Amino acid sequence: MTTRRPLPPPLEIPKPGFGRRTPPALFPPIMGLFGLGLGWRAAAGAFGVSPAIGDLILGATSLLFLFTLAAYLAKPLRRPTAFMEDLRVLPGRAGLSAASLCLMLFAAVLAPMASGVATALALSAFAVHVGLVVAIILTLLRGPEEGRVVTPVFHLSFVGFIIGGVAANALGYHDIARWLLWSMLLPAGLIWGFSARQLLARVPPAPLRPLLAIHLAPACLFTLVAAGAGLETAAYAFSALAASILVALLVAARWLTLAGFSPLWGAFTFPLAAFASALVTLSQGQGALGAIGGVTLVAATLIVPLIAYRVFKLWPGGKLAAKTNAATA
């Protein structure tokens, strides 16, 4: 009679530590919340609404951003290569670009309260974004050729510096804002042109169509920066461009959302908030433009937090990381 050996103890899979798989896809909706708060800050001056609305949104968003940023940084601190792995996938590139742009928006938030801190933060954010763009270029060059196709996410990476113009205007550096405005027109124009050509040549797959909303953001930011820098004629021209893009997106709304909700719906948040903020800032609440801006701001207030909530709801349990192929530390 053979003696039975005791069974080995059950394999215990260690629970992941804090931030081991924080997905970069969390940052685009945070960017949208920042845009919404800045829109309500502009509405306080344009419509005379209570500034507490904007302050509340911006304060809560700032805390959410700092917590999410700390959660994400825990990942590359554990395993530095996780950062480059996130850059290999489209949601990762979009999310990390949005993260560095959130730093610029955070600087704009702090500008009226702590100009010195905001200036230092804006310069740091600009340097971080330069480094990120270099890392993205290296990732694209080392990756497969099909991964080098121009996408709307290129706006976040290569045109995102224009958000520095929003911070520069808030800090009183209008010459820098003008320089950023004119220097970003070329890359934005190239991305719009290549994207239009691709859209005519082939229909993008349904799950990626929400990213097309990003095309609205540069036109809105050009309007904001031009208005803040005193370039009124240019601001109206850019607002007309933004309006035409928004109309096209609204007409194609059913087509854009055909695949149903996904984390990529975060791409809808900032462009919508930025459009509202641009019209409110440009019109100062006056006339038809002010009315459209006010209605859009209210609509954004209903839509942006809802999308942000649904994206963040996928974070616990790793669903969001799995859906966006986020790297694990």
Image (cartoon, rainbow, N blue to C red):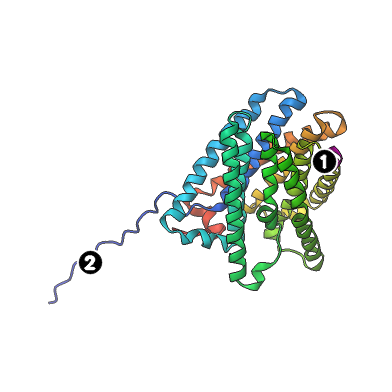
Question: Where does label 2 land, which residue?
Answer: 7
Give the label, 1 or 2, closer to the camera: 1
Where residue 317 sits: x, y (%)? 47, 51
Question: Is residue 209 visible in this depiction of the protein?
Answer: yes
Where residue 273 sits: x, y (%)? 71, 40
Question: Where does label 1 land, which residue?
Answer: 235
Q: Up-down: is 20 above or below 295?
A: below
Assess disc 1: are there few (<14), some (14-19) or many (≥20) residues with their C-alpha within 10 Å of its C-alpha: many
Relative side of 18 to 135, left or right = left
* Magenta part of the chain: 232-236
Relative side of 151 to 5, left or right = right
Where residue 91 sits: x, y (%)? 60, 57
Where residue 222 sits: x, y (%)? 77, 45
Nearer to the camera, 78 or 173: 173
Give the residue displayed 82% in from the left and 42% down from the top: 239
Nearer to the camera, 250 or 128: 128
- Quadrant including the N terminus: bottom left
Q: Is residue 224 magenta?
A: no
Give the residue displayed 52% in from the left and 61% down from the top: 84
